[in-house]
Image (tube, helix red, strand yellow):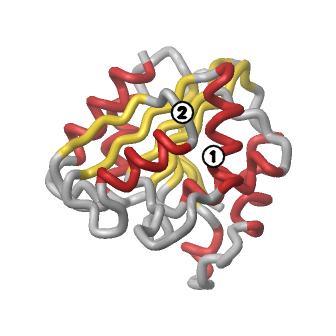
Amino acid sequence: MRFISNKYPNSDLIVILHGQYGSLNQPLVRNIFERLKDLNKKVVLFEFSYVQTGQSFDPDQTTEAKELKDFLKTQKHKSLTIIAHSNAIFITLVLWEMKVKIDGLVLLGFPLMQSAETPKEMALMLQQINNYGNICIIQAKKDEYTSLNYVRKFLKKCKLRIELLTLDGNHHFEGFEAQVGETVKKFLQ
């Protein structure tokens, strides 16, 4: 595991998680980190061990969730907000199932497949976090994995009042990283 952090100990903690094929150098997560690091909060750009070892992503995300949970135990914080891109959303779900309290959530590129049934566990997690924290979903208009209509239907079916923001670009928001970074910063201020 590797991470980059600013210097705000014992503060609200924001953890940025890259997607399955991402890294610390992915333009999207790097841009978000650069935009958030001047907030009066500790901001961590987290990279999973499999990226350095060349191993593959754990299909059920348990290995990654345990790694993140162990890391979080070393961080003193008042509250935890997770910014998760793509498949890192499912790592967040496993983390929540491990009883880690998540106070806020920003989901980038919600990767629900069009033909999939509504994931009940995902709905339960979002409902619980929504009871006491803020959730924002930022979805690209041209996301190749999940359409905006599908995300809207999922949120309506789950009866969730979550802020859904749409931006230009594809699933990785290529060419729109700065806009995503500014949008996330405004949501978290």
In front: 131, or 32?
A: 131
Is 134 left or right of 99, judged from the image as shown?
A: left
In front: 57, or 130?
A: 130
Which secondary structure lies at badge 1? helix
Task: State how many labels appear.
Answer: 2
Q: Which residue lies furthest to the front in this view?
A: 157
- Classify the position of the C terminus by image quarter: top left
Q: Are marks 1 and 2 in contact (CB under 8 Å)?
A: yes
* Residue 49: quadrant of the picture: bottom right
Residue at screen point 69% across, 42% down: 125
- Between marks 1 and 2, how big is the CA–CA gap? 8 Å
Above or below — where is 26 with respect to 96? below
Residue corresponding to mark 2: 160
Residue 64: % across, % down: 70, 64
Above or below — where is 94 with respect to 189? below
Residue at screen point 55% across, 73% down: 51
Residue 146: % across, % down: 36, 62
Categorize mark 1 by other alpha carbons within 10 Å: few (<14), some (14-19), many (20+). Answer: some
Q: Is residue 25 visible?
A: yes
What label does residue 123 carry, if any? 1
Residue at screen point 64% across, 51% down: 122
Q: First in sequence: mark 1 or mark 2?
A: 1
Above or below — where is 96 with respect to 103? below
Q: Which residue lies furthest to the bottom in this view?
A: 55
Is 24 left or right of 35, judged from the image as shown?
A: right
Tag 1: amino acid: Ala
Tag 2: amino acid: Leu
